[in-house]
Image: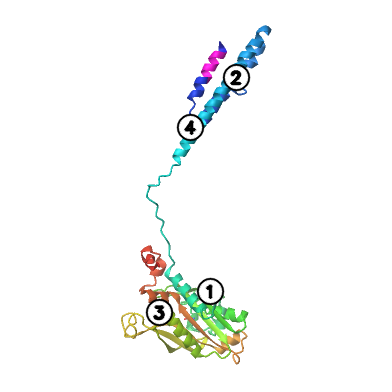
Amino acid sequence: MEEVDLLQEATQEAEAAEDSRALYEVKMKFLGRTGKVTALLKGMKEIAQEARPAFGKRVNALREALEEKFAALEEKVKQKELEKKLAGENIDVTMPGRHTKQGALHPVTRVKDRLIDLFSGMGFEVFEGPEIESEYYNFTALNTPADHPARDMQDTFYLTEEFLLRTQTSAGQIRVMEQKKPPIKILSPGRVFRSDDDATHSPMFHQMEGLVVDKHITLCDLQGMLDEFAKKMFSETSKTRLRPSYFPFTEPSVEVDVSCAACGGKGCSLCKGTGWIEVLGAGMVNRRVLENCGVDPDEYSGFAFGMGIERIAMLKYGINNIKLLTENDTRFLEQFKD
Ligand code: PHE
């Protein structure tokens, strides 16, 4: 009998199905709209009238039996699949852990953060100017005449006739004084660019600029603040010394030395036997610069200072080549972890 064969065939195939997708396909093959059992019912009109009820009953019984069979098998296959999935997700807690490398702040960032921290404690606020500057802010407003050697193409990266990569964070002084009336006390960290390249110079480096403008500001205020800076940055016993110098935007101008922390001022290879190390340039803001920014030099005075952050980092950590700071060799950088 055809129905008995079909029951056997379907059962065999369904039991052989490995997963729910295969099982579904078998189910469709027999019970689907174009399936074999469905085809039996469709063929009913070819059967003699009187035999139809009995035939219909048998096919329906077959259909029900198969539906039950599939339901039971579906349940079984699903259970099997779940078990397989769970087995794959098993966590072996005895496996060794994976190590992730822990990063650390770059020495330049560390020194920059330390400087900001130190000067904020003295009431300075941070202002950041743009890296692309006009000639006016980088030179002219800073009282640097057009024929000054610092304007030479060899020192400065010009982008156009008017615009350049700033050679000093001093450019920010002008922007601050244009925007803000005294009292002014700002700190301006940032990248600067110069066409210069050897063991202690890099075409890109960082500076930290400071500017204080108020009534009755004198060179003594600058020196007092620098002493405080040297003690906090280098060592409690550090001293500072001012030497006359020249910058177009300060008058008088000074170069500031700090007593050598490596030898305590006795003289060593780091300080080339002098006991002192030059750390920054500074001075009283030139009257002409104040005037250029609309600040009355008869009412206000100020001081400014600028230091190379790489230079401070090199002195503080005993780094002998500035290039180490941009090579990003992790063997070097790993030494600066807390
Ligand atoms: N801008 C100077 C330089 O880059 C440093 C400086 C800043 C000097 C402020 C005086 C006052 O060398």
Is residue 300 or residue 221 the one in the foreground?
221
Mark found first going from the N terminus, 4 or 3? 4
In magenta segment, residue 9: yes
Mark found first going from the N terminus, 2 or 4? 2
Instruction: Describe the element under mark 4 as helix, strand or loop.
Output: helix
Q: Determine contact: label 1, label 3, CB under 8 Å.
A: no
The residue lying at 50 percent from left, 30 percent from top is: 77
Q: CA distance from mark 4 to mark 3?
A: 70 Å
Q: Position of residue 326 (x, y in %)?
A: 42, 68
Residue 321 visible in this rendered orientation of the protein: yes
* Disc 2 crowd, CA 10 A, few/some/many (<14, 14-19, 20+): some
* Disc 4 crowd, CA 10 A, few/some/many (<14, 14-19, 20+): some
- Indicate which disc residue 216 carries: none
Q: Of helix, strand and loop, which mostly describes the magenta segment?
A: helix
The amino acid on which the numbered mark 1 sits, given as a three-letter code, is Leu
Q: Which residue is mark 4?
A: 80
Q: CA distance from mark 1 to mark 2?
A: 87 Å
The amino acid on which the numbered mark 4 sits, given as a three-letter code, is Lys
Instruction: Describe the element under mark 1 as helix, strand or loop.
Output: strand
The residue lying at 49 percent from left, 87 percent from top is: 222
Q: Position of residue 206 (x, y in %)?
A: 47, 74
Q: Which residue is mark 1?
A: 164
- Indicate which disc residue 234 carries: 3
Instruction: Describe the element under mark 3 as helix, strand or loop.
Output: loop
Instruction: Describe the element under mark 2 as helix, strand or loop.
Output: helix
Q: CA distance from mark 3 to mark 2?
A: 92 Å
In magenta segment, residue 304: no
The span shown in magenta is: 3-10
| In the depicted structure, whether residue 109 falls above or below residue 11 | below
Q: Determine contact: label 4, label 3, CB under 8 Å.
A: no
The amino acid on which the numbered mark 3 sits, given as a three-letter code, is Phe
